[in-house]
Image (cartoon, rainbow, N blue to C red):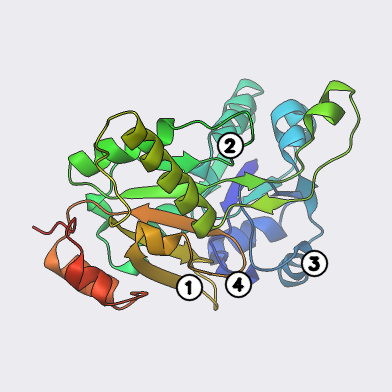
Amino acid sequence: MLYLVGLGLGDAKDITVKGLEAVRRCRRVYLEAYTSVLTVGKEALEEFYGKELILADREMVEQEADSLLKEADVCDVAFLVVGDPFGATTHSDLVLRAVKLGIPYKVIHNASIMNAVGCCGLQLYNFGETVSIVFWTDTWKPESFFDKIEKNRQNGMHTLCLLDIKVKEQSLENLMKGRKIYEPPRYMSVNQAAEQLLAIIQNRRFQGEKPEITENTICVGLARVGALDEKIASGTLQQMSTVELGAPLHSLIVTGTMHPLELEMLKLFSVDSSSFENNACQRTT
């Protein structure tokens, strides 16, 4: 049996009882190590689970999945994922590979940022399409995610923006030369994401457009949701460009039309209460 086990968002103890039981009876246990991070290290998980963990990077999961599934038809193998197992399409691919090999599988769900984002007070059913904001480079500055945020906002929906994670990435030079040399890990912060959104707004105005999202659009910054040091900050997009929420992982929400209760909840986390009182672009139902 292949077990796909969600670990939740905080520390080692966020695993479900069902998940922990599965892990402890498995012969091999892999820890997915590239789509998200926990607030504790591999060693803390091993101590709590009572099992040695094998780190599974993107290369292993996407290119060497058969080795990961080896003997899973005759013994139990677990694949641990921060959050919920199906937060990334890569894991669907793993299931399809297992089925093709005749290996049964079981999914043990847990909390993920997709539902835990409700901690800020915005109602989950008022969210539109989730987008990813990627790190820009000097030569690559995509804006397609901005169009999706605008579409959500036009429909009155909030947008959860998942921020880029660069783990075990190679530079272009090392990639072209086939050198297994990796760049230091990088995690996009709320203020970096806000700066890119502000730059797009300026670009669109320069092209004669009137963006649906402006510097005064109310946004929410979140850091380490589910952990003891969780941080939430609400305010204008301009304020999000300067807010400091500390260590990763960060997420950003661009609000749409807000119910008065949603607005009251966001005020609990306001960087500056006057942002809500004076914001001309604020929308409520």
Residue marked by disc 1: 231
Q: Give coordinates of residue 26: x percent, y percent.
A: 73, 52
* Earlier residue among tags 1 and 3: 3
Q: Is mark 4 on a helix, strand or loop?
A: helix
Q: Give coordinates of residue 96: x percent, y percent.
A: 57, 26
Q: Residue at x 29, y 49 (%)?
A: 214
* Earlier residue among tags 2 and 1: 2
Measure the C-alpha gap from mark 2 to mark 3.
Answer: 23 Å
Q: Is residue 64 left or right of residue 130?
A: right
Please state which of residues 80 and 227 is positioned toward the viewer in this rendering: 227
Q: Residue at x 33, y 54 (%)?
A: 215
Which mark, by number, is residue 13? 4
Which mark, by number, is residue 62? none
**Whether label 1 touches label 3, CB < 8 Å:** no
Q: In this view, does 80 lie to the left or right of 92?
A: right
Q: Is mark 1 on a helix, strand or loop?
A: strand
Please state which of residues 31 and 228 is positioned toward the viewer in this rendering: 228
Quadrant position of the C terminus in the picture: bottom left
Q: Which residue is drawn at 71% across and 37% down?
A: 58
Quarter of the image for residue 42 reads bottom right
Residue marked by disc 2: 91
Q: Is mark 3 on a helix, strand or loop?
A: helix
Measure the C-alpha gap from mark 4 to mark 1.
Answer: 20 Å
Measure the C-alpha gap from mark 3 to mark 4.
Answer: 13 Å
Which mark, by number, is residue 43? 3
* Earlier residue among tags 4 and 1: 4
Label 3 packing within 10 angstroms: few (<14), some (14-19), many (20+): few
Identify whether 215 is placed above or below 99. Answer: below
